[in-house]
Each structure stands twice: as structure tokens, then as C-alpha cells.
């Protein structure tokens, strides 16, 4: 279960934890509780334009797979073999 606080709030983390995780002021964290333990996970926020571009590339790739233009491999070894043919 994910609990979300809708108001802005802040906490202070020990410097050793901030440094160990490579966090910076203003970084976003997902905070949730499970079985009495509070978890804080760094969240990366991507610009909408970047996400839209990725979505467009994925849509194009799926269309190429449907049309047979995009090769599909059953394993990594099969892909590597195909790449080594060139």
C-alpha cells in the first residue's frame, strides 16, 4: 500500500546517508510504509518532452515488429549471433 501526503513537507536525513545515496537538495523521494518499516526511494523525474519522445519511439518499434520490419529474437545469444554476422 502506498500512502501519499498531498501537502509539501520536508525531512532532514543524516549527511552520511545523503552522501552514500548521492542525493542533492530538492531530490524527490517516494516514501511508503510496509510492515511497520518506512522506506524512502529516490525518484527520477523526467521532462514530459523526453517521455513523449520515448513513447513515440516505442510506438514506432511496435509497428515495425507488427509489419515484420523489426527482427525479434528469442534469446540474447540469437541477437548476438545476428550482430556478429555483419
Image: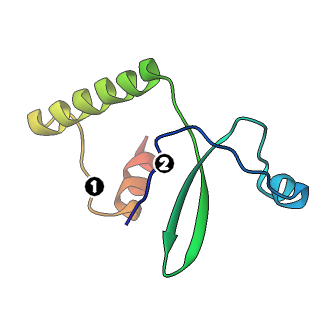
Quarter of the N terminus within the rendering: bottom left
How is this picture coloured? rainbow
Q: Which residue is drawn at the image coordinates 54% and 34% (left, top)? A: 45
Where on the picture, by quarter, is residue 37?
bottom right
The residue tagged 1 is 73
Q: Residue 30: percent from the left, percent from the top?
A: 54, 52
Which residue appears farthest toward the right when viewing the image?
Answer: 15
57 or 7, nearer to the observer? 7
The residue tagged 2 is 5
Q: Is residue 5 left or right of residue 59?
A: right
Q: Dot 1: what SS?
A: loop
Q: How many marks?
A: 2
Q: Is residue 64 left or right of residue 52?
A: left
Q: Is residue 46 above or below residue 74?
A: above
Which residue appears farthest toward the left when viewing the image?
Answer: 67
Q: Which is nearer the N-term, disc 1 or disc 2?
A: 2
Q: Residue 29: percent from the left, percent from the top?
A: 60, 49
Amino acid at each position: 500500500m502506498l500512502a501519499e501526503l498531498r501537502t509539501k513537507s520536508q525531512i532532514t536525513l543524516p549527511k552520511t546517508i545523503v552522501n552514500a545515496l548521492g542525493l542533492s537538495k530538492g531530490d524527490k523521494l517516494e516514501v511508503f510504509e510496509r510492515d511497520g518499516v518506512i522506506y524512502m526511494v529516490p525518484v527520477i523525474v523526467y521532462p514530459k518532452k523526453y517521455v513523449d519522445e520515448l513513447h513515440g519511439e516505442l510506438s514506432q518499434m511496435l509497428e515495425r515488429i507488427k509489419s515484420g520490419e523489426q527482427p525479434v529474437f528469442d534469446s540474447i545469444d540469437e541477437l548476438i549471433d545476428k550482430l556478429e554476422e555483419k
